[in-house]
Image (cartoon, grey):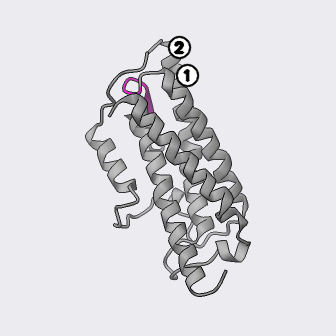
Amino acid sequence: MTQTALLDSLESELRQSLEMVRSQIASYDLSALQFRTSPERWNALECFAHLNAYLERYIPRMELAVHKAKAREWKPVEVVKYTGVAKRYIRRANPENIKTYKTPKHYNFWQKTTGKAALKGFIINSERLLRVIQAAREVNLNKAKVGRGKSGFFTLNLGNTLEWQVMHIRRHLAQIETQIAQMQGRGLV
């Protein structure tokens, strides 16, 4: 995929996600956002807290990668490359992938008290991610590296990281949409 096509697609998907959150999900009251489809499933606010934890860890790393790439004058490339690890991360985050995965402890907010601040934080973090995507248009997505994990020692290229983050957002928003549809089906909202 070309760099321009990837960034256009990610920007479009993220804008659609933000619009859906603002126009539909944000209007629900706290009890609706805390609704669980089953005892072991996350509610909407726990999903937003989970996404915030990832975004708050990775956005500064992506911003730094863009800044370094600009300083080194790494100009945009035609084709975005994918590593094996990146392909696996993106495949796991894809909303069409129905398999569930064990969430690392520091990203798991199941049955932890979360309020509507998690929803507001998600909107703010998504807007920051949107600015990173826009800034990434000026740099080489293959050369710019983003540290992953706690240490940041292992890296993914910026293009792979951006795609993974947007897919991850879409996956959990699809989960939230399913919860809302179930609530509406039961006449709870």
Q: Quadrant of residue 27?
A: bottom right
**Magenta region, mostly helix, strand or loop?**
loop
When the figure is inspected, residue 108 is found, relative to residue 71, above or below; the finding is: below
Q: Residue at x 55, y 22 (%)?
A: 67
When the figure is inspected, residue 151 is found, relative to residue 109, above or below; the finding is: above
In-image side of 29 versus 174 (left or right): right
Which residue carries the number 2 mark?
71
* Residue 61 at x, y percent in the picture: 53, 34
Which residue carries the number 1 mark?
67
* Residue 80 at x, y percent in the picture: 34, 30
The residue type indicated by label 1 comes to: His
* Residue 148 at x, y percent in the picture: 44, 40
When the figure is inspected, residue 111 is found, relative to residue 12, above or below; the finding is: below
* Residue 14 at x, y percent in the picture: 54, 46
Q: Badge 1 local density, few (<14 within 10 Å), some, or many (20+)?
A: some
Q: Residue at x 56, y 53 (%)?
A: 17
User: SS class of the residue under badge 2?
Assistant: helix
**Magenta extent:** 141-146
